[in-house]
Image: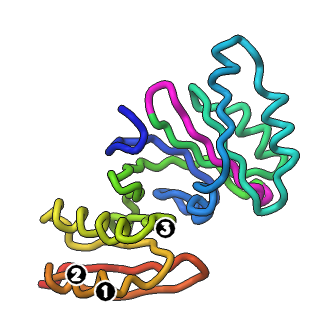
């Protein structure tokens, strides 16, 4: 399975309640990626390279590593240096691990995430299905949300994580018999609780 296509992903997360990705993941998606797979394939130990890169990350910053496996020992080492981490298995031999310099608050949680073709992330929590469309350029957020609603007639509720209040989405929801029942707004994180009418 290739990146950018619909895929099931196994995640290990930090900095968020169990069941979903951490709140900081949206900002980490823009960070450059350090791919250590070629070094490992050549029999080289990339630890020095990774630690050098980690030294340059300021508080609140990010480090993203691509590896052929879940680098649990590295995650423990960087947790001791103040990094929370969140790992995504993209394929059987490709992991992407996001590190956030936040004091290493919490980093051993699991979640099952799916990536939609538009790049939105979906996962389930106690209050239902969540979709994160932050960092997507319009009209991709609306397309991802409508894909979920149209493609899952059994779906009765959806929690949307967005960067702004999506004005053009609301009439589309109404046409489909959906409505916004609650919303919260923080910096670059608007959450909308959607429900199907009736």
Q: Name the residue under label 2.
A: 173
Foreground mark, 1 or 2, reads 2
Q: Distance between the residues labelled 1 and 2?
A: 8 Å
Image spot of residue 98 (x, y percent): 63, 47
Q: What is the quadrant of the N terminus in the image?
A: top left
Q: Do the residues labelled 1 and 2 touch (CB within 8 Å)?
A: yes
x, y percentage for residue 84?
70, 52
Magenta span:
91-103
Q: Which one is nearer the viewer's eye here, 162 or 158? A: 162
When the figure is inspected, residue 196 is found, relative to residue 148, above or below; the finding is: below
Helix, strand or loop at label 1? It is: strand
Q: Earlier in the sequence, mark 1 or mark 3?
A: 3
Tell me where residue 172 sits by quadrant. Answer: bottom left
Sequence-first disc among 1 and 2? 2
Secondary structure found at label 3: loop
Q: Name the residue under label 3.
A: 134
């Amino acid at each position: 399975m290739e990146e950018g296509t619909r895929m099931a992903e196994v995640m290990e997360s930090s900095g968020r309640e169990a069941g979903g990705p951490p709140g900081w993941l949206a900002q980490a998606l823009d960070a450059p990626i350090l791919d250590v797979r070629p070094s490992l394939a050549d029999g080289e130990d990339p630890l020095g390279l990774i630690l050098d890169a980690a030294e340059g990350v300021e508080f609140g910053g990010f480090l993203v590593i691509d590896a052929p496996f879940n680098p649990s020992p590295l995650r423990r080492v960087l947790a001791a240096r103040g990094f929370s981490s969140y790992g995504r298995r993209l394929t059987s031999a490709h992991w992407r691990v996001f590190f956030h310099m936040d004091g290493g608050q919490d980093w051993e949680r699991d979640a099952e995430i799916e990536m939609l073709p538009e790049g939105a992330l979906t996962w389930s929590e106690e209050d239902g299905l969540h979709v994160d469309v932050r960092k997507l350029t319009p009209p991709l957020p609306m397309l991802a949300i409508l894909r979920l609603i149209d493609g899952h007639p059994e779906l009765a509720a959806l929690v949307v994580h967005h960067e702004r209040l999506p004005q053009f989405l609301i009439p589309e929801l109404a046409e489909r018999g959906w409505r916004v029942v609650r919303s919260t707004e923080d910096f670059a994180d608007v959450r909308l609780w959607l429900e199907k009418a009736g």
